[in-house]
Amino acid sequence: MSETTSPARALDEPAAAGRARPAAAVRAAGRRTAGARLRKAGTVVLFLAPSAVPLVLFTLVPMVGSLWVSLHEWNLIGAMRWVGLGNYAALLRDGDAWRALGNTVLYIAGYLPLVYVGGLGLALALNRVTRGRDLFRGVYFLPVVTSWVVVALIWKWLLNPSEGIVNKILALLGIDGPGWWTSDTWALPSVIIASAWKDLGFVMVILLAGLQAVPGDVLEAARVDGAGAWRRFRHIVLPLLSPSTFFVLVISCISGFQVFDQVYVMTSGGPAAAASEVAVERVYDLTFRYGRVGDASALSWVLFLVILLVTVVQVRLQRRWVDYG
C-alpha cells in the first residue's frame, strides 16, 4: 500500500526547505551587508574629515579642556589645584562678572534692533533698484569682510570727542557732541554704533534674498484689492520674510554674546569702572591680566550655557511667528 502525502505536509515542505538553508550562506550575506555599510561609512568619514578634524582639534578638544580647567585654580604657570565647583560658586559673588554679563545684554538690546532695522531698510531700498544692484550690494557688504580692528580704529577716530568728524558735524548743527568712547554713558553706545554699521551688509544680503523670494503676483493681487504699501508690507512681506528674520536674529544674537574685538580696541572695557566691559573681555582680563584661568574658564562656560539657552528659546518660539509657507 503506497504512502500518500497530505496537502498540509505538501505546503510545509517549501518553508522547511527555506529554513534548511545552510547557515554559512546566511553568514556570508550578513558579511556582505556589513561590508557595504563599512564602505559607506568610510566614504562619509572621508568626505567629512576635512571639516570634522579641525572641528575636533580646535573646537571640541579646547572646550573639554576649558571645562577641566574650570574645575581648578590655575595661573597659567604653576600647577593646577582642584577646587571642584568653587570657581562657579565664586562667580555668583563676583560683581564684575555680573556687570560684564549685564553690559553684554545691554549691547545686544541696542545692537539687534539697530542692525535689523538698518539692514531691512537697505534691503527694501535695493529691492527696488533695477540698475547697479550688485554694485551697491557689494559696497554695502564690504565692511562685513573688513577686519574688526580696522573698523574699530576708524570709528574710534570718527567718534573722537575733540577731533572726530561726528562731533564736528554735530557742532555745525548747534549740538554739543558727547564724549563717546571716553564717556561712561556713551562708551557702550559707541561700540553698538560701530558694530551695527559693520554688520548691516550681512543682514541686508540675507533679507534681500528673502525679499526677492516674495511672489510678485501675491503683492500685485493685494494691490489690486486695494491694500496700500504699508498693509502689503505688514501682512504679506513681513510674514513671508520671517524665516530670513529668524535666521538673522539667531546669528546676530549669538555673535552679540561673543562681542570682544571692537570693545577691546575702542574702549578696553572702560573708560572707568568697566563701563563697557563685556563677558568675553572679562574672560580675557581674568586670564591674561589677573592670572585667574579657572575663573575665566568657568565664566566662559556660563556664557556658553546662556547662549545655548537663549538659542533654544528662540528656536522654540519661532514656531509661533515664523511662516515657512
Image (spheres, rainbow, N blue to C red):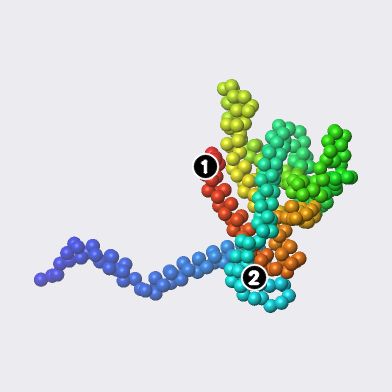
Q: Position of residue 146 (x, y in %)?
A: 79, 51
Q: Secondary structure at mark 1?
A: helix
Q: Quadrant of residue 297?
A: bottom right
Q: Of 132 and 81, which appears nearest the observer?
A: 81
Whether residue 73 is situated above or below residue 133 in the rendered picture: below
Which residue was labeled with disc 2? 69
Which residue appears at 58% of the width and 68% of the height?
A: 85
Which residue appears at 75% of the width and 41% of the height?
A: 137
Q: Position of residue 19 (x, y in %)?
A: 31, 69
Which residue appears at 76% of the width and 53% of the height?
A: 263
Give the residue type at disc 1.
Arg
In the rendered structure, the answer to whether residue 142 lies left or right of residue 299 reads right
Across the whole image, how many numbered discs are drawn on residues? Answer: 2
Q: Quadrant of residue 100?
A: bottom right
In the rendered structure, the answer to whether residue 56 lies left or right of residue 201 reads left
Q: Position of residue 143 (x, y in %)?
A: 78, 47
Q: Nearer the viewer, mark 2 or mark 1?
A: 2
Q: Is residue 122 visible?
A: yes
Give the residue type at disc 2.
Val
Residues at circles 2 and 1 in contact by the CB criterion of under 8 Å = no
Which comes before the other along the chain, label 2 or label 1?
2
Q: Secondary structure at mark 2?
A: helix
Residue 320, label in figure: 1
Q: Going by the picture, which residue comes out furthest to the left? A: 1
Instruction: Name the image quarter holding the C terminus.
Output: top right
Q: Position of residue 268 (x, y in %)?
A: 78, 56
Residue 270, label in figure: none
Which residue appears at 62% of the width and 75% of the height?
A: 82
